[in-house]
Structure formats: structure tokens, C-alpha cells
Amino acid sequence: MSNEVAELIKQKLGLKNPKIAVILGSGLGDLVESMEDKKRLSYKDIPNSPTSTVAGHKGELVYGTLCGKEVLCMNGRVHLYEGFDPSNIAVAIHTLKDLGIETLIVTNAAGSLNKDIAPGSLMLINDHINFSGRNPLVGPNDDFYGSRFPAMNGAYTQSLLEKMKEIAKREQIKVHEGVYLMVLGPNFETAAEVRMFTKMGADAVGCSTVPEVLAAAHCSMQVIGISVITNYGAGMVQNAPSHLETLLNANKAAETLVKLITAFIKEEG
Ligand code: HPA
């Protein structure tokens, strides 16, 4: 099934040979504006494809170039808290694999659990904690894509993380590095949860990314994860976090994110 869908996407978007795909999180659609020779395909026009119900998530595949390098963008994602089954996410990642994608850049908006990582900053994800209780690899394993019990040691590709840090330094973009913890959501965390997650070694919390990374690592894709920090976790500051604050801060940081990803694709793509 996935292969037929890949074929359809290939034809509708006129794909040549993209090797890099980017998943854009809440309020982070700006990258698409920088792309040239764009072609768009709404998720609605992809058979069996779930569509996001969340404000700030567009729901389209966009193919084009950045600095002359081909890139395929998932502009908007679906979340497990919307009621989607994690297998939907595995199918989407398998489709990218079928299309020849080798490197996946996953972005998200996340809450900070670390007082040194302020809202408005970027955090490169060096590892994750799956606290969602869900997993896209549950169910019969498709050996075509990967093994039943994949190791997650290198889920976030170390060499690409180092490359991203070098590029950030050169472009004078300040980036943090840390552990992303996924909750199912949709509510923001309690202050007690925030204290617990900090003690567990997490630096940022959000409701996405981990399923995509699990599926991508399972099928041997290289992965880079970038969190745009949009708010402090509950109890770290006076005000309560909100989706509006998330979108506003994501929009503010989007320009820096676009600069970083573009510079990376220019070299790597
Ligand atoms: N918690 C969970 N998800 C989020 C947050 C948060 O604080 N900020 C943005 N997405």
C-alpha cells in the first residue's frame, strides 16, 4: 500500500531525487516560504493520510529546493493526542523511506524543563525519553523496513548533530543541546510533572517527534531533531503556558530555525 502511495506522491509532485525531508512542527511553517520551485500536495489528496486538526498545522507535502538542493517538507504533522493511531505515523515515515529519503529533520515546539534554555531558543535533540506510553512500532513487524527489536543508541545521528553544531557556530546561531521528553498530551504538564521530568534528565517536553524518530530509526534513516523552545514548563515561571504563547514564540524563533536548516541542507543535500 505504502509503495502505491509513494508512487502517487512522486508523480503528483514530480519528485526527482530528494534525499532530505523536513517535518515542520507547530507554527514552524516558514521554511516553506523560503523554498523555490514549489509544488504542494494536501494530505487530503493522499489516500489514507490523516490530516491534522490543530491550529498552526497546515497539512501538506511541499516539494522544492533550498539553495538549489531538493527538499521534501511535511508542513504540519498529526499528533497522537488528536486520536490518531501511532501506526499512521509509521506509514508516513515508511512512505518517505519508499521515496528515497535518507535524512529526516524533525522539528517541534517544546516547553523548557531547564532554566538555562529560555523560550525563543533552539535545542538540538541528542536523545529522547518516550513517556507517551505509545509506540508506532507496535504490531506485526515489517522486516522490509527494519528489525523487530531495533536499538535506539544512534537514533539521533551523532555525526549530523556535530555538523549542525558546527553550522550553528559558523552562522552565529546559539543552539542548546538536550533530551526531549514526549508526553501524550494534549494538556500542558502539571508543575509536579515538570519537576519529575527535570529529575529524569529531560531538558524539553512536547507531544510529538518521538513516534517519527522511532519509525525513522527503525528503517535506518539518519535523524536530526530540533526543538524550538516556546515556553517554560509549569511552575518554572509565574504564568501558565498556553497554545497562543507556543505559536507566538515558535513564529519568533522560526526565522533562526529556517536559517539553520537552510545552511545545513546547502551542505548536506
Ligand atoms: N508541553 C507540551 N507540549 C508543548 C509544550 C509544553 O510545555 N510547549 C510546546 N509544546
Image (spheres, rainbow, N blue to C red):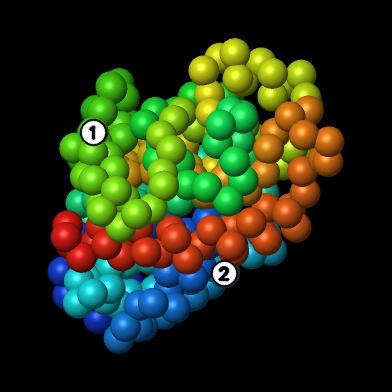
Query: Which residue is disc 1 drawn over?
Result: 158
- Vertical position of residue 40 compared to residue 122: above or below: below
Give the position of the C terminus as an image quadrant: bottom left
Q: Is residue 108 above or below residue 178?
A: below
Residue located 25% across and 53% down the image: 170
Quick check: 24 left or right of 232?
Answer: left
The residue where tag 2 is placed is: 58
Q: Quadrant of residue 133?
A: top right
Q: Are marks 2 and 1 in contact (CB under 8 Å)?
A: no
Residue 64 position within the rendered picture, expressed as x and y whole percent measured from the top left: 30, 77
Q: Amino acid at mark 1?
A: Gln
- Between 100 and 139, the one nearer to me in the picture: 100
- Residue found 23% across the figure and 74% down from its top: 67
**Residue 69 found in image quarter:** bottom left
The CB of the residue at mark 2 lies under 8 Å from ligand 1: no
Label 2 is placed on what type of residue? Lys
The percent position of residue 245, horizontal first and vertical second, equals: 73, 54
